[in-house]
Image (tube, rainbow, N blue to C red):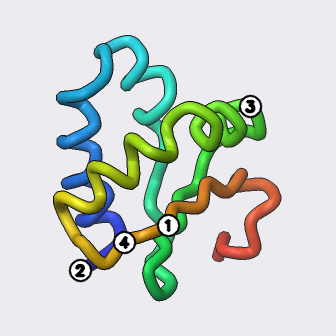
Amino acid sequence: MDAQILWDEILKEIKEKISGPNFETWFSTVIARNIEGNTLILLVDDPIQQEWLEARYTSTVLEAASKVKASIKHVAFIYREASPYIN
């Protein structure tokens, strides 16, 4: 499954679990870069968003991911500017 397609399905699950304003604030600009093994690599806009998602939403993302694709066991939030994954 393509990473962005997977992420779109995960976002549908997350949207049902958190408030609309929180979803828009923290998830609306996140994009999927790729899947490496059992890790979903997600790109975020800035270090604050990265830290917030890691601290408060990692388990939410993983729970949603397990419903969509059971093989995803880890998620990595990468700040776009610092990412070696940018083309």
Three-letter amino acid code of the residue under disc 3: Ile
Q: Which residue is mark 3?
A: 48
Three-letter amino acid code of the residue under disc 1: His
- Residue 72, above or below 52: below
Q: Residues within 10 Å of mark 3 (few under 14, many from 20)?
A: few
Alpha carbons under labels 4 and 2: distance apart: 11 Å
Q: Which residue is mark 2?
A: 1
Q: Are marks 4 and 2 in contact (CB under 8 Å)?
A: no
**Where is the C terminus found, in terms of image quarters?**
bottom right
Three-letter amino acid code of the residue under disc 4: Ile
Give residue 8's position: percent from left, percent from top.
25, 53
Q: Can you name the residue that lies furthest to the bottom here?
A: 37
Give residue 82's position: percent from left, percent from top.
81, 59
Q: Which residue is mark 4?
A: 72
Alpha carbons under labels 2 and 3: distance apart: 29 Å
Q: Which residue is mark 1?
A: 74
